[in-house]
Image (cartoon, rainbow, N blue to C red):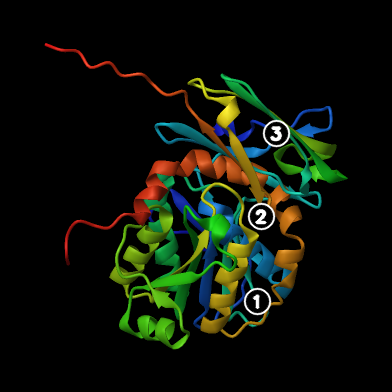
């Protein structure tokens, strides 16, 4: 556990990895991102069959003098995250909505074809 | 003054760095759990009420880290008190891993008894799947004595009647009951894995109905985004330690009638 505590979620290029959650609901994935300081209009979401990519600009550039566990100055203005999906999804049927600073993405999986085998 | 547990086998020590006398204090605890409700609530409370730091909790079981605040090295689990010694607050800036729960609860309840605590109030959250649809999170309570149950009722805080609780708080409640220390757990509806300042405001609103403190909660809403950003690292740690599955069990019903 201890080494994981020191893992950091930001990059040196002004981008920050958002907190996110993936839920596998059998026929779909539900992914949420926590995006403080972000307006709906500044979110770009790219969905492919096997991955999604999020870019979200913040309302303002944030500068923290002593950031988190690493205690050093950091400036950032964007969230960025790419997620590789464990199963293929249908980008055409993907929907997304943004509420209370949380982006919700509903990614339906491709329907699995089941054959009935006569015995 | 060091107020250490005498038993050398005790692996968690409560260290007091003051000679302050306490007058049957109310002890409030805020550990990181779902939504970081307890940590956000106690941090905010300490900031607004100007409590002084009076000690810390030390253990070989804690991660080997210190917290730097304004250039000072601090223990991540600290104890604060008001001027009169009537209220004590315990705040943790590290997640409490399962291996620490039992020895930490044992040492804390032992210390609560030695301080003659009039009541222990634990602040936390209860994760709800429809949190996005909830405008104002509700707070429910669980108490371990008849008297504190009445206090909950008089404060219009609904009592949790059925369910499971997991983590440090049920262990504290259980041990408090065994040792005759009145204990109450306040739980606000919250996001499971994202810092939730609104839920922290809800739990503080309920706390103010139980004890005589007054805190302007407006800033928790105004600075919600800033609080969320600052709490990211701790939320990430806490998620790893607690695990989604464990907390989801709390929404299930126990199988037995009791």
Viewer-proximal residue among B97 and B137: B137
Disc number placed over residue A100 in the picture, else none = 2
Asked if the residues shown at circle 3 and circle 1 are in contact, with their CB atoms under 8 angstroms apart, the answer is no
Left or right: residue B119 compared with residue B41: left
Vertically, is B60 above or below A3?
A: below
Quadrant of image for the N terminus of chain B: bottom right
Circle 2 crowding by C-alpha within 10 Å: few under 14, some 14–19, many from 20? few
What residue does disc 3 label? A17
Viewer-proximal residue among B2 and A7: A7
Q: Residue at x 69, y 33 (%)?
A: A9
Q: Residue at x 59, y 58 (%)?
A: B39
Left or right: residue B181 compared with residue B13: left
Q: Position of residue A25 (x, y in %)?
A: 42, 36
Residue A68 lies in quadrant: top right
- N-terminal of the pair, mark 2 or mark 3, is 3
Q: Position of residue B112 (x, y in %)?
A: 44, 70
Pointer 1 chain: B
Q: Is residue B32 visible in the rendered structure shown here? A: no
Q: Say which element carries label 2.
A: loop
Q: Residue at x 78, y 48 (%)?
A: A39
Circle 3 crowding by C-alpha within 10 Å: few under 14, some 14–19, many from 20? some
Disc number placed over residue B135 in the picture, else none = none
Asked if the residues shown at circle 2 and circle 3 are in contact, with their CB atoms under 8 angstroms apart, the answer is no
Left or right: residue A97 compared with residue A70: left
Vertically, is B211 above or below A19?
A: below
What residue does disc 1 label? B82
């Amino acid at each position: 556990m201890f080494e994981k505590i020191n893992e950091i979620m930001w990059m040196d290029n002004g981008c920050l990895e958002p907190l996110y959650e993936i839920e596998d609901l059998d026929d779909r994935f539900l992914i949420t991102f926590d995006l403080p300081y972000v307006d709906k209009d500044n979110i770009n979401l790219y969905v492919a069959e096997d991955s999604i990519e999020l870019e979200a600009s913040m309302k303002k550039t944030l500068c923290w003098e002593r950031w988190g566990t690493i205690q050093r100055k950091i400036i950032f203005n964007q969230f960025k995250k790419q997620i590789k999906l464990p199963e293929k999804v249908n980008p055409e049927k993907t929907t997304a909505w943004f509420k209370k600073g949380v982006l919700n993405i509903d990614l339906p999986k491709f329907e699995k074809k089941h054959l009935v085998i006569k015995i | 003054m060091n107020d250490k547990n005498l038993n050398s086998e005790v692996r968690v020590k409560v260290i007091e760095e003051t000679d302050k006398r306490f007058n049957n204090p109310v002890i409030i605890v805020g550990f990181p759990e779902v939504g970081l409700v307890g940590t956000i609530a106690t941090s905010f409370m300490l900031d607004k009420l100007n409590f002084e730091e009076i000690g810390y909790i030390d253990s070989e079981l804690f991660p080997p880290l210190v917290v730097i605040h304004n250039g000072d090295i601090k223990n991540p689990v600290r104890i604060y008190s008001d001027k009169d010694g009537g209220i004590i607050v315990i705040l943790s800036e590290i997640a409490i891993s399962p291996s620490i729960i039992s020895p930490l609860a044992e040492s804390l309840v032992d210390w609560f008894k030695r301080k003659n605590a009039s009541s222990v109030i634990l602040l936390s959250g209860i994760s709800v799947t429809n949190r996005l649809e909830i405008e104002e999170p509700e707070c429910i309570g669980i108490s371990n004595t008849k008297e504190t149950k009445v206090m909950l009722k008089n404060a219009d805080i609904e009592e949790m009647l059925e369910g499971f609780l997991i983590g440090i708080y049920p262990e504290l409640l259980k041990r408090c009951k065994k040792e005759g220390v009145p204990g109450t757990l306040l739980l606000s509806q919250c996001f499971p894995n994202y810092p939730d300042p609104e839920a922290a405001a809800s739990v503080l609103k309920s706390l103010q109905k139980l004890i005589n403190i007054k805190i302007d909660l407006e800033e928790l809403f105004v600075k919600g985004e800033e609080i969320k950003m600052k709490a990211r690292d701790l939320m990430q740690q806490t998620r790893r330690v607690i695990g989604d599955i464990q907390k989801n069990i709390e929404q299930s019903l126990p199988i037995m009638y009791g």
